[in-house]
Amino acid sequence: MPLRPSERISLLRDIMTIRRFEESVKKQLQAGLIPGSVHLSIGHEGAIAGGCAALDDGDFVVGTHRSHGHPIAKGSDLGPLMAELMGRADGVCKGKGGSMHLTDHSVGVMGESGIVGGGLPLATGIGLSAKVLESGRICLCFFGDGASSEGSFHESLNLAAIWKLPVVYLCENNLYGATTPADSVLSVEDIAIRAGGYGIPGEIVDGQDAEAVHSVVARAVDRARRGEGPSLIEAKTYRFGEHAEGLIIPVSYRDEEEVDRWKKRDPLDILRTRLFEEGIVSEEDMTQMESELQQRIEAAVAFAKASPMPEPSAAFEDVYSNPIAGGSR
């Protein structure tokens, strides 16, 4: 079912929010407020927002090491997200997760991993749980092109196909695994074709077109919710920046023409222009949206800066959970 005008505006707002959040993250990193490695999703917003827009509030998401945008698209509060990146106690993981391990169970974001392909088995297990519990929930699993060559990818898709688990596997193929061109390490041109080996649907979509991604993911979600099992979707996308922010690569592995060509297909520009041309939004609407978003980002940064650093003793909290009723922690 096509998105209503209000839903299309909401989709645009999600893309804008991810973009402005990531731009602010870059600034905070340069100011020395964010420790560790940071992998920005600028350029990927169409695949992220489009995919998450096809989910219900109760559905689940599993992300990757490049996943600040996924919790945002699922509805996370920007303040605790920014606080988490700064390693503060008020972060979504109390400052223990950082950039590559954001988790926000309140909106169904069940985990992100710095391990390539690490989220695939987790998503498959979530799908199994949803099926056993007959909850009707879906898990949308994001992963990159590099993960499609991991054993966890093949094992997860095989098991999900056999048991008809309600999981939608969405590959954000940005054409590079760090600095390695995907076409030099993949046995096939299109990752989606690998779905045939497991007897499940595989589909390719333009990852820069958020509405196209939404349409494809929505069909896969409906299929999974009907009990017909998993699907594999490959969103062709591109990261506009470096693999990790601030990473210095002595030898260029991407030519400028390629980068410029992809930047001309900015997911934010594509949807914004389309809504302009169709009369869905005006220049005034965009100005107001940008102003409101700037205030939200500034408030998130202020919240994060005001949040205390975790106490050293907190390292021993939340290490394990005793599932037995009345059990001690």
Image: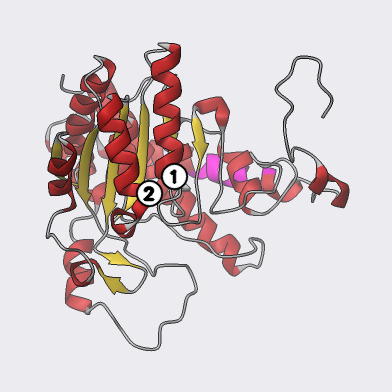
Residue 242 point in image, percent of width and height: 39, 70
Q: Amino acid at mark 2?
A: Ser
Residue at horizontal 59%, vertical 61%? 28
Q: Residues within 10 Å of mark 1 (few under 14, many from 20)?
A: many
| Type of amino acid under label 1 | Gly
* Percent position of residue 42, x then y: 37, 56
Where does residue 272 sit, x and y in percent of width and height?
A: 23, 42
Between 297 and 142, the one lying in front of the other is 142
Q: How is the image coloured?
A: secondary structure
In this rendering, would 123 be left or right of 221? right
Whether residue 204 is visible to the viewer of this picture, yes or no, is: no
User: What residue span does the magenta drawing correspond to?
Assistant: 294-303
Which residue shows up at 37% across the image and 20% down it? Answer: 56
Left or right position of 102 against 123: right
The spot of residue 94 in percent (x, y) is: 71, 42
**Residue drawn at x 27%, y 38% as measured from the top left:** 158
Quarter occupied by the C terminus = top right
Work out whether 204 lies above or below 99: above
Residue 297 highlighted magenta (yes or no): yes
* Residue 19 counted in the magenta span: no
Q: Can the viewer see residue 107? A: yes
Quadrant position of the N terminus in the picture: top left
Residue closest to the far bottom: 250
- How far apart are the alpha carbons under marks 1 and 2? 9 Å
Secondary structure predominantly adopted by residues drawn in magenta:
helix
Q: In the rendered image, which residue does mark 1 sit on? A: 119
Q: Mark number for residue 152?
A: 2
Residue 277: assigned label: none
Q: Is residue 245 left or right of residue 94?
A: left
Sequence-wise, which precedes: disc 1 or disc 2?
Answer: 1
